Structures are given as C-alpha cells and as structure tokens.
Image (cartoon, helix red, strand yellow):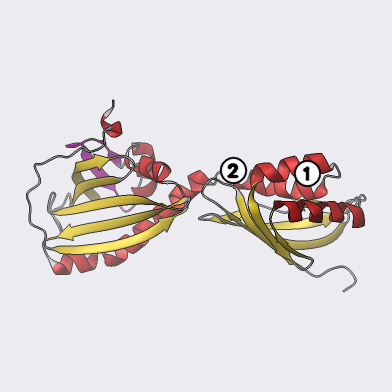
Amino acid sequence: MTLLEMNSMTHTADHVTRPHRLDRTVVIAAEPATVFRFFTDSARWARWWGAGSTIDPHPGGRVYIRYPDGTEVTGEVLEIAAPRQIAFTYGFQSGNPIPPGASRVTIRLEPAGSKTRLHLAHEFSETTVRDEHVQGWRYQLSLFANIVADEVFAGAGEAVDAWFAAWSDADAAKQAAAIERIASPDVRFRDRFSLIDGLPDLLAQLAAYQRFMPGLRIVRDGDIRHCQGTVLADWVVRGADDAARGRGTNVFVLDATGQIESVTGFWGALPGR
C-alpha cells in the first residue's frame, strides 16, 4: 500500500494557533479522483499555480508555489488522504504578508453527482491578512476549475465533430452507434426545429433529417471554445455542391465523463429568409 492509498495520513508537527478562517466552496466539472491528482503531481500543480511550482505529496513534503509574477510561496504538507483531503501550510518566502508556516490551507473534496464539490478553508492569525486573500482565492479556484476542466474535456472537439458527423451520416446504424458513444441516454437537443429529450427521440430526429434533407452535411466551422464543460462550436450546412445552405452555433454541455448532456442550436440567417 502506498502513502496515497492509506485512508489517513497526518503530520502532527503543526501547533500554530490560527483563529481567523476564510472559507470558499466551488463545484468543479470532474470526479474527485481526477481533481485530487492535481495535488499529487507536480506537473499538474504547476499548471495551476505557475511554472516551477512543485509539491511532494506526503506528510512533511515540501509545497512550493511560484506565481507567474515571480512571487514565491513555501509550505509543508500536513495531511493527505486521497481522494478526499489535503492540508498544508502556506507562507511567502519573503515573510510578507505571511511568513512560512504561519497559515494553513485545507482542501476537502466530496462527490456532487458526477462532479466534485471543493471546500477550501484557509486559516490565519490575523483578520486583515485573511481579508486580503478573499479575492485571491476567488480567482485561484476559478483558475483551478478551468485547468482541471481543460484536462477532463481535452476530447471535446472530437465529441463535437462526432455529433455533426452523425447528423450527416445516412447509415442509421452508424448514426446510432456514434450518438450512443458520445451522448448521455437523457441527452437534450433544442434548436428552431427540434425539441428533443432522450436518445430514442434524438435518433428519430436524425432519421427524419436524413429523410427530408438528404445529401446535406453539417461540419464544424473553426475552433471550438470551451469553458468548464460548456462548448461553443460554429457550424455550416453544405450541400453536395459544397455550397453553404445554412450556418449557426451550437452550445454543448458535457458531463464530468465527457459525454454530451445537452445541445442548443442557434441558426444564423437562412437562405431566402
């Protein structure tokens, strides 16, 4: 059994009194085990905090943060229990406004459906210093949620392309296989011509699309834009002659496993209207 597999690991040398606490809770679009690995891998830790940041994930291990502006923070891992909790001291190398060892950060994770609810508590000895860190943690946890999501949804572009390809495929069996692979059973789809709930209804809509608009294909137009599981993708409908028959934008919502939960389509101006 490795240290990270143990149910509880604690470093007991921390006896500093810190009566003032900053609390913040956020929900991240990833499972707890996925989120926790950003606390146990220096490469991922550095993607959050800044190049050169490192963490030694065991009690007594060194915590080092190098912010993009060069500011340095050091600390020591006090407790670690994967994938639920990590606690470490936090202080600035310069000693100002917090000397090394003078504050404590505890991060606790719990499942929230397929996502993770992250609870952060940062304990200080002074209220003024605590208050100075409120906006900092608001920003850092927002940044963290995006960095985790960027890894979880690295294949979002492929899912989007598979969605459009399914609409363009005249083979019903291939359509069904593609949609079942990328979409949840309760997938929802909304656009000017669709009000769809669930996979069977969606597959029926795809069949109708092929019946009434044969020969048309939908393709992505440009790069996707992604933020924490929500994806924007522009598209164009082309005929057999490759001429554009319509354009628009889809908003995809993905779950923490990368499957499509919902799609909302916005059409641009239609030809002749």
User: Which residue corresponds to mark 1?
Assistant: 175
What x and y, as percent, mark residue 262?
63, 58
**Nearer to me, 196 or 70:** 196
Q: Is 35 covered by the magenta stretch?
A: no
Residue type at numbered disc 1: Gln
Residue 173 located left or right of residue 53: right
- The relative height of residue 18 versus residue 152 in the rendered view (above or below) is below
Residue 9 visible in the displayed image: yes
Residue 182 located left or right of residue 201: left
Q: Which residues are magenta?
A: 54-69
Q: Quadrant of the C terminus?
A: bottom right
Residue type at numbered disc 2: Gly
Task: Identify the residue at horizontal 54%, vertical 54% (top origin).
Answer: 229
What x and y, as percent, mark residue 127?
15, 68
Q: Residues within 10 Å of mark 1 (few under 14, many from 20)?
A: many
Q: Quadrant of the N terminus?
A: top left
What x and y, as percent, mark residue 235?
74, 56
User: Which residue corresponds to mark 2?
Assistant: 155
